[in-house]
Image (spheres, rainbow, N blue to C red):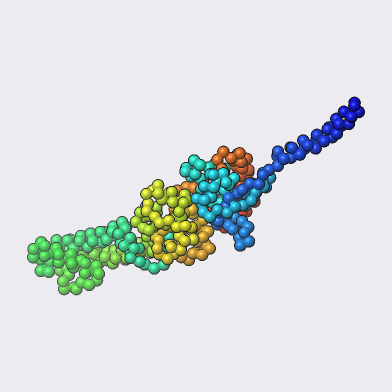
Amino acid sequence: MVLRIAVLLIMWLSVLPFAQAQDATSAVAPRELVVGVKDAPPFALKGADGTWSGLSIELWRQVAKAQNLHYRFVEAKDMPELIGQTAAGKLDIAVGAITVTVDREKILDFTQAYYSTGTGIAVPIVSVMNWGTLRRAMTSFNFLQAVVALIGLTLGAGILVWLLERRQNEYFGGSVTKGISSSVWWSTLAMTQRSSAEKGPQTILGRLVATIWLVVSVITIAVFTAGVTSVLTTSQIQGTIASVADLTAVRVGTVKGTSSEGDLIRRKLKFQSYDNLGEGLRALRLGRLDAFVYDKPLMTWAIRQGYASRLKVLDVSIEAQSYAFALSPDSPLRKPLSIEILHTIQSDEWTEARVRYLGEEPLSFR
């Protein structure tokens, strides 16, 4: 009996470490994370073979490798679906060009931001003069200021000649109204070099003033012409939109369900929504829109790929934006991922990825 108990005890002691090792292994074995992605070049690009690449994808791969995470990608058709499924817990994490907003923060968790940008404005490149550009140029403050100055100089020269010639020259004589109108008309013709000598001033002082006015008028016309040309050329280059304030008077588009749409709503601007960036840029290219509002780096990438000679992104931003990974609410991954992101974006690999996908670094990074 004692021998039997001793044998059983030895067998139990030999099996116990193996069982504990199995339990420990099953307890720490990481599960496969479901990572949601959405095509948003250059941050997330889906290849023809179904593989994913892009700036955010590379960052995720570096972070996941450092944290020894196992995962699989699941594609979402649009941003609302990506956000909704992450908030519902169907996706563990969402990766791509995901902007941190107040509304999303209420239903999601976000990691440390890894990219700072802004909402941009894309417009057509104006290659020919159009009525909108001409109207904007002709009603600009600089143009109106030049016109008023030219009229003022013409009136001043005409009245001065009338004061000197009204008693000695019949052409400038008569009533005050007739005399001033004749003298102003003469100064106008003199400025355009259309006046005749017989109808000009006859007195010495009058002719001295006329000589000075002829010289001044030539310079004035040259300066005025140069100023008008500058205004029209600047307007032709810039088009009808130069700032956010100009969006109130033009046709604006954006992508529905995005933070850019929220920016326009908060500013109470009228706009037309499109299903994706490609549709919006095509509408802008065809003249159905005057401006398209969306994330600046995404628009810059898309325009470089197919609209470089037709569209451009203005050097202005509507709202500041930060990109981060989105997590399901109360995710235990938030803190370790944030720490790893901060570590990774300081590495040479991340710098090389930025240069490779963006070409340059005009924006600030975190």
Which residue is painted at 61% across and 56% down in the image?
52
Residue 73 position, x and y percent, is: 61, 52
Question: In the rendered view of the protein, which quadrant contains the C terminus?
Answer: top right
State the residue lying farthest toward the left: 174
- Left or right: 65 in relation to 193: right
Could you tell me which residue is drawn at 48 percent across and 58 percent down?
A: 277
Relative to 85, 262 lies left or right: left
Taking 209 as reference, is 16 above or below it?
Answer: above
Residue 37 in view (yes/no): yes
Which residue is at the front of the view, 167 or 306? 306
- Residue at the extreme front of the image, as rendered: 1
Residue furthest top in the image: 2
Q: Position of residue 220 (x, y in %)?
A: 29, 63
Residue at image x 35%, y 54%? 248
Above or below for 9 versus 156: above
Quarter location, residue 130: bottom left
Q: In this view of the protein, can residue 317 be seen by the observer?
A: no
Q: Position of residue 343 (x, y in %)?
A: 63, 43
x%, y% of residue 276?
48, 58
The image quadrant of residue 4 is top right
Q: How many marks?
A: 0
| Residue closest to the eye, 140 or 74 | 74
Which quadrant of the figure contains the N terminus?
Answer: top right
Q: Is residue 218 toward the left or the right of residue 197 in the image?
A: right
**Residue at 45% across / 60% down in the picture?**
280
Who is closer to the viewer here, 11 or 260? 11
